[in-house]
Image: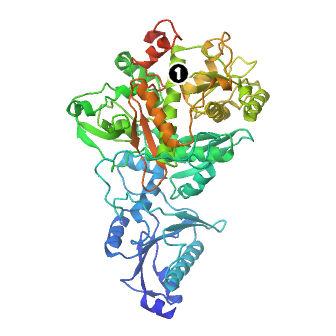
Amino acid sequence: MRKSLQSLKVTVKTLGLIPQQDLINILNSLQVKVADEGDLTIILTDNYLHPDLESINQQALASHKPWLLVNPLGNLAWIGPLFDPDKTGCWHCLAQRLRDNRPVEEFIIRQRDNKISLISPLGFSSATIQTVLNLTAMEVFKWIIQGKNQRLEGMLMTYDTLNLQFQEHILVKRPNCPSCGYSLNKTPLPVVLGHRKKAFTSDGGHRFCSPEETLKTYQHHIGPVTGIVRELNKIQGNALVHTYVAKHHFRSVFDDLDSLRQNIGGRSAGKGRTDSQAKASRFCEAIERYSGVFQGNEIKEEASYQELKDKAIHPNKCMNFSEKQYQHREEWNGKNQGWFQKVPEPFDETRIIDWTPVWSLTAQDFKYLPTGYCYYGYSQSEPLDCWADSNGCAAGNTIEEAILQGFMELVERDCVALWWYNQLVKPSVNLESFNEPYFEQLKQYYEGLNRELWVLDITSDLNIPCFAAISPRKEREVEDILLGYGAHFDPKIAISRALTEVNQILPNVLSFKEDGTTIYNSSADPLAVKWWQTARLSNQSYLVPDSKIIPKKSNDYLQLASDDLLADVKLCQRIVESKGMEMLVLDQTRPDIGLRVAKVIVPGMRHMWKRLGAGRLYDVPVSMGWLKETLTEDELNPFPMWM
């Protein structure tokens, strides 16, 4: 012990107004040698994002010497991490996560072009500072005599000086870190698929492993300090209704107060028939959204659409806006607050922009889409002619699982668009025929809320089961009609997804005044509130089942799913190609997370948002015999799908 204490020297420095002598005195009392140049450097600071820490980090990486960060101020003091250049992540790895978890501060800094943190520690005294310094010195002492200390190395400890509680926050070493990571591949790689046996098929989708296993593997990414997901909170429910909200980093192309409010309030909400499925669903969607945010190290190519020729995909083949929508975009955008309802500028085929390579499963080659269409928060120069959305994006335990989930979302949105905008009257589904107790229990629960609940079959020409769940209030002028959708090879799972999506939205319409009128949350989407207040079964007749068609039963549906995720993906691809379309995949997996994320793209398939360009939206209802003739754009449902 004495040899270690005698041979290893510690340096103490300060950034800010924290005196270093107190810590030096405590270290000396433990017989720890303190010197101007030591084997370990301790930095005392009131700001873990202090600009000078960048150069300190670079020096430590170059010298391969460990260093420790400590903030003893405030009612929540921070000790660590101890950065070891040969073992742990570096300060840059930490800083990226800290910034992502401070959306308000980072927004103000961007607006003011100021790199100095705005957070000032509150609620501390000389006694609490001494306590934290004593704790720090003792942990350093342990590290010296033991040669290691798992509470410090790659770990940030927070100490609540009010309730005397510790909490540990893992520092993830980011392979893609610009300071300590490896050089990222600058050549695009094909998406290589393999056989993956399914292990979980009972709720939400077909998975490589159970929701519990997924959460166990990736739960270290949940946390307010170093986590990808700041919070994962359950909305009050019951044994039938399980909903979680996740708060996480997200950056829209519109860097404004409205986007900031959404970022603070929670960007994702999860659903499931069980608590673990709802929790895993929300966590995975949060990771999916995070992985789709542009970070700057993505592979891209600079060119114009005309220069790329056949390799490029025109973004409006994916967005599907009409010429009329482009012509009247200024008037439309002025009346609609939500960014997902906005219409961009027409795409300039001669402009030099960044293009992202996406792998075509159909052509077995790379095609190119604008980077602004592929990633959230990509900084584009004016005019804004396309932007990213989450359609077709999904996270999974394997890339095959992510692709399958993402494609099923494309199918769901496509079916909804065909049904909604053409206002097609569809048959109902006999839920009892599926012999699923949950379905009947949920109907009874909604009955107790004075609501009806039924399911429509809105399956399209793709013949993949897709359903819309409908729930209006009974005996009230304002019906607060809820909608939920689901698509899957397994019709029971597709129905379950539609029903649990209604569960997810249900809390928005459960608060009432004494006279029975609904109290809507002030943060609710204005378009959604308008729908709840004005939509009636009497003026939205396509929500009512077709009385001329016998309700669909479970034995009306073929079992298309296999026990192999790859086989299911291949079937998806064949279905797409049979309709003359192409299936593409962008692998958005981030190496510091591990959970696979894919953006599946099928040009021509429709989003459920109001995008009224020519194509399937008009052609399929006629070819399937649902309509005698094609509707005009003006004849389509005027109310935009608000979900």
* Residue 95 percent across, percent down from the top left: 42, 59
Residue at image mark 1: 460
* Residue 220 percent across, percent down from the top left: 55, 58
| Residue at left offset 43%, top offset 65% | 89
Question: Given the image, on which type of amino acid does mark 1 rest?
Answer: Ser
Quarter of image, res 38:
bottom left
Question: As rendered, which of 233 and 417 lies closer to the eye?
Answer: 417
The reply, left or right, for residue 506 in relation to residue 588 is right
* Residue 33 percent across, percent down from the top left: 45, 88
Question: How crowded is the residue under tag 1: few (<14 C-alpha within 10 Å), some, or many (20+)?
Answer: some
Question: As rendered, which of 617 and 526 lies closer to the eye?
Answer: 617
Question: As rendered, which of 51 and 415 lies closer to the eye?
Answer: 415
- Asked whether residue 360 is in view, the answer is yes
Marks counted in the figure total: 1
Quadrant, the C terminus: top right
- Asked whether residue 25 is in view, the answer is no
> Does 180 sit above or below residue 394?
below
Quarter of image, res 36:
bottom left
Q: What scheme was used to colour the molecule?
A: rainbow
> Does 509 sit above or below residue 542?
below
Quarter of image, res 75:
bottom right
> Does 107 sit above or below residue 493?
below
* Residue 91 percent across, percent down from the top left: 41, 65
Question: As rendered, which of 14 and 185 lies closer to the eye?
Answer: 185
| Residue at left offset 60%, top offset 56% | 216
> Circle 1 — which element?
loop
